[in-house]
Image (cartoon, rainbow, N blue to C red):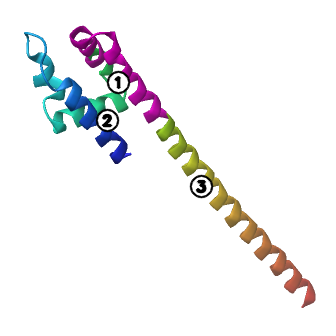
Amino acid sequence: MALYSSIYCVIGVEYFGFDVSDTGSMQDKNWGHLSKGMLTLFRAMTMEGWVEDAEELELTYGPSANLFYVTFIIINTFILMNLLIGIVVESMHQIGAQKRREHKDSLEMRRTSKKV
């Protein structure tokens, strides 16, 4: 996840870190250097305030700049969903294995108690 975010951060800083408008707000606010880029991508990951960032990019660089955010969010969603599903499946597998062990132990206890 960190590698994925770092790659997108470098791409974002490279393409959007240079101010092409007269205001200078884009460079100072979101993509001036790597730490600002990572913070901007974190905002996109949490889906908090990314729309304003994307609109600002669109105004400065045109509609094709939204492709950057859309691809980041879609790929991020798939990665997080896979991680979440993996955690749930692994937890359910462990719970099932524990219940099978408990059931096996209880059957053995019954067998030994009947023999005595």
- What element does badge 3 sit on? helix
Q: Position of residue 64 (x, y in %)?
A: 34, 14
How far apart in space, not on screen, are marks 3 and 2 (Cα)?
Answer: 31 Å
Nearer-the-camera pick, 53 or 108: 53
Pointers 1 and 2 in contact (C-beta within 8 Å): yes
How far apart in space, not on screen, are marks 1 and 2 (Cα)?
Answer: 8 Å
**Label 3 sits on residue:** 91
The amino acid marked with disc number 1 is: Phe
**Magenta span: chief secondary structure:** helix
Which tag, 3 or 2, sits closer to the chain's start?
2
Q: Which residue is at a point 28% across and 11% down the rendered structure image?
A: 58
Q: Which region is colored magenta?
A: 53-77
The amino acid marked with disc number 2 is: Tyr
- What element does badge 1 sit on? helix
Q: Residue furthest bottom?
A: 116
**Label 2 sits on residue:** 8
How far apart in space, not on screen, are marks 3 and 1 (Cα)?
Answer: 35 Å
Residue 9 lies in the magenta-colored region? no
Q: Which mark is residue 68?
A: 1
Location of residue 116 (image quadrant): bottom right
Q: Which residue is at a point 25% across and 30% down the rendered structure image?
A: 12
Nearer-the-camera pick, 111 or 46: 46
Observer-side mark, 3 or 2, equals 2
Which tag, 1 or 2, sits closer to the chain's start?
2
The amino acid marked with disc number 3 is: Ser
Q: Is residue 28 left or right of residue 45?
A: left
Q: Is residue 64 left or right of residue 85?
A: left
Q: Residues within 10 Å of mark 2 (few under 14, many from 20)?
A: some
